Image (spheres, rainbow, N blue to C red):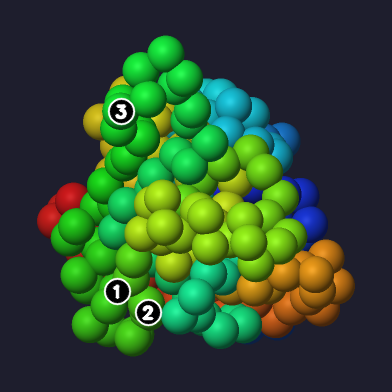
Amino acid sequence: MILVICPLKIEFKYLKEAFKKLNYKISTKPSHCFVQDTPLTLAVGGHGKVNFALSTFELIKSLKPDLVICAGAAGGLKGTSHLDIIAATKTIEHDYKTLFEPNTPLPEFTGDTTLIKKISILDKVKTGVIASGDEDVVSEKRADEIQKLTGAIAVAWEGAGGAKACKKTNTPFLELRFISDLCDESTHKDFKANLSKGMNIIASKLLIISKELNLRDL
């Protein structure tokens, strides 16, 4: 089973609607829902790394998935465009600041390499680092700082939380995001404008993953 966790309730709502538009029935449970005739289970993780980590850990304990995917929106850094789909080769915490030991490396988590390789071949999804931190990035200056610090091509909040929970439970993990905005003064407007369409694209990619991926390879 593939557990797809959306950070935000609005992302979860649009993802369910996207599957319904594709004629998939949704079977709802108290903490999650199933996309019938697929191995996909959908849930909400909550905003921010801590909320997402706790929710992911509890969902893993109860559902015992073969794979966890953090799916939602991200801000695009230089080299990306609106509605690009990014599969994270690494998720790096950009807001981990150690003033006493300034040379301490940033925490980073590697995405499941088998899955990333299959996705990039199957559906031309962009791959690269996603920077993870509890911060809205709404200026080009801050976006450039994060990109120089991490080498990321996108920035989002929750990925590192999910990655930590998966590492603790030895569960394969992938962060899959669409670019909703470009981390500038138009971020808030662009996020709202692109959210529904972006989650529609995410749904189509998840269906490809669910049909093509052999979970026994993980």
Residue 62: x percent and y percent? 48, 26
Residue labelled with disc 1 = 119
**Residue at horizontal 85%, vertical 72%?**
189
- In the displayed structure, would residue 158 be above or below residue 40? above
Q: Quadrant of residue 29?
A: top right
Residue 201: x percent and y percent? 57, 80
Q: Nearer the viewer, residue 43 or 168?
A: 168
Residue 188: x percent and y percent? 83, 65
> Which label was assigned to residue 103?
3
Precedes in sequence: disc 3 or disc 1: 3
The reply to whether the C-beta atoms of the residues labelled 2 and 1 are less than 8 Å apart is yes
* Relative horizontal placement of residue 188, taking residue 164 as reference (left or right): right
Which dot, 2 or 1, sits closer to the camera?
A: 2
Using a 10 Å C-alpha cutoff, classify the residue at mark 1 as few (fewer than 14 neighbours), some (14 to 19) or many (20 or more): many
* Relative horizontal placement of residue 90, taking residue 33 as reference (left or right): left
Alpha carbon distance from label 3 to label 1: 34 Å
**Amino acid type assigned to the residue bearing label 3 in the image:** Asn
* Relative horizontal placement of residue 35, taking residue 18 as reference (left or right): left
Which dot, 3 or 1, sits closer to the camera?
A: 3
**Residue at horizontal 39%, vertical 44%?**
92
**Residue at horizontal 32%, vertical 39%?**
108
Residue labelled with disc 2 = 125
Precedes in sequence: disc 2 or disc 3: 3
